[in-house]
Image (cartoon, rainbow, N blue to C red):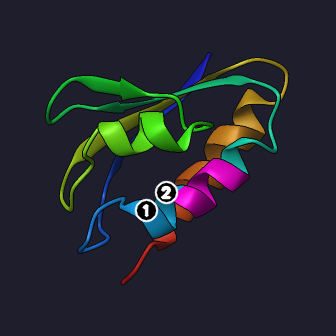
Amino acid sequence: MTSKKLTINNPTGIHARPATELVKLANRFSCNLQLINHSNGKVADPKSIFSLLSTAIKAGSSVELKAEGLDEAKAVEQIAEFIDSLEE
């Protein structure tokens, strides 16, 4: 298992537009993924828009991305870069 802790710097958090792009990216990988919002304890499947939006990830939230499977390291690296680059 590979994991990485991140802070959401996007001033509007992960709302519909960035969530849609995140889901597209996450679905490129075969590994199992979880995005845990430490602010409220909710766990999302980043491959599902409904799951991702239900976690209410706001600006400043501390999250942890976890991956398990063949391409887990690449998935964590690319998804973490995407989340860190969000700006609106």
Q: Position of residue 58 (x, y in %)?
A: 21, 56
Secondary element at tag 2: helix
Secondary element at tag 1: helix
The mark found on residue 58 in the picture is none
Whether label 1 touches label 2, CB < 8 Å = yes
Q: Position of residue 86 (x, y in %)?
A: 45, 72
Q: Position of residue 85 (x, y in %)?
A: 49, 72
Marker count (numbered): 2
Region of the chain picked out in magenta, as a range: 20-24
Which SS does the magenta portion mostly show? helix
- Label 2 amino acid? Ala
Instruction: Indicate the quadrant containing the N terminus: top left, top right, bottom left or bottom right.
Output: top right
- Label 1 amino acid? Ala
Q: Position of residue 80 (x, y in %)?
A: 54, 52
The residue at 58%/55% (across/down) is 22
Q: Which residue is mark 1?
A: 16
The residue at 36%/24% (across/down) is 43
Furthest-bottom residue in view? 88
The residue at 75%/24% (across/down) is 31
Q: Which residue is mark 2?
A: 19
User: Who is closer to the viewer here, 31 or 27?
Assistant: 27
Was residue 64 drawn as part of the magenta stretch in this picture?
no
- Up the image or down, 11 lies above or below 2; here it is below
Q: What's the distance in space between the residues labelled 1 and 2, CA to CA? A: 5 Å
Residue 13 showing in the rendered view = yes
